[in-house]
Amino acid sequence: MEREIIVTADGSKTIQIKGWNEQYHSKHGAIQEAYHVFIKNGLNLFEHQELSIMEIGLGTGLNAFITLLEASKRDLKIQYVGVEAYPVSDWEISQLNYVEELDALKNRKDFEKLHSSPWEETTMITQDFCIQKVQRDFKEIHYSNGFDLIYFDAFGARVQPELWTEVIFHKMFKALKMNGVLVTYAAKGSVRRAMQDVGFQVERLPGPPGKREMLRARKVNS
């Protein structure tokens, strides 16, 4: 499908899939969405120094890069697994302006290293942040009790409903440690019910710009 780079409302860029009318990040502000959903309502819940995070839909690397920046600010040690079935091209990455928009020029090489690091291997990006990029269909995830936090950033249920089912959320539930958290920009009732049906305790939260609500789910029993 045809893809193009677009500028979102906060000045940061993202990738749009024209045939689906779907973007990798919110057209109302890619960076604003990432901070609101994944940092404010996800990462900021945790105070202990060492964290393991899995992202479903590594995509442009924006969420991973912001998490890397936060780790440095807050003296966190983060082990990050980014799952992506269809990696973004080098050309598309070169067109994104996250380093500039985040005022992170001193971290440009870190952003580049995120994307140039080999798949299926763990790479130290900074002293506070290491990543393993995994090229895998989300249905092929088989982790158990491994993560404190999951960023669930798959394409929306409108275009890929199979990614928002009980089957997938059961895998997410199993992958989390006890008291682990999953956050996502989505808020559909069918998504919330699928989460609840596999055992998550789910809460609705105010959404990022352009969305009324988002969801946060906790693993409070096994």
Image (tube, rainbow, N blue to C red):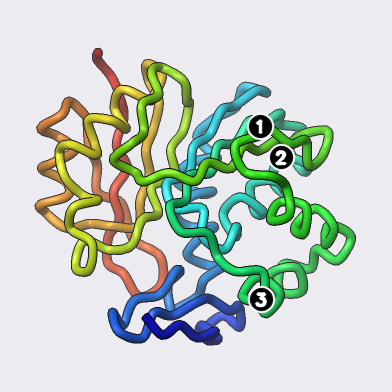
**Residue nearest the viewer, comparing 66 with 84:** 84
**Residue nearest the viewer, comparing 200 with 62:** 62
**Secondary element at image label 1:** strand
What label sits on residue 91 in the rendered view?
3
Where residue 203 sits: x, y (%)? 24, 42
Residue type, numbered disc 3? Trp
Residue type, numbered disc 2? Ala
Nearest to viewer (mark 1 / mark 2): 1
**Residue nearest the viewer, comparing 36 with 147:** 147
The residue that disc 1 covers is 78
Where residue 213 sits: x, y (%)? 27, 60
The residue that disc 2 covers is 71
Asked if residue 96 lies left or right of residue 22, the reply is right
**Secondary element at image label 3:** helix
Give the mark, 1 or 3, whose residue is nearer the N terminus.
1
* Residue that appears at 67% across and 23% down: 49
Q: Which quadrant is the N terminus positioned in?
A: bottom left
**What whole-number distance in Å separates the C-alpha atoms at marks 3 and 2?**
27 Å
Residue type, numbered disc 1? Ile
Asked if residue 98 lies left or right of residue 9, the reply is right
Question: Residue most toward the top?
Answer: 222
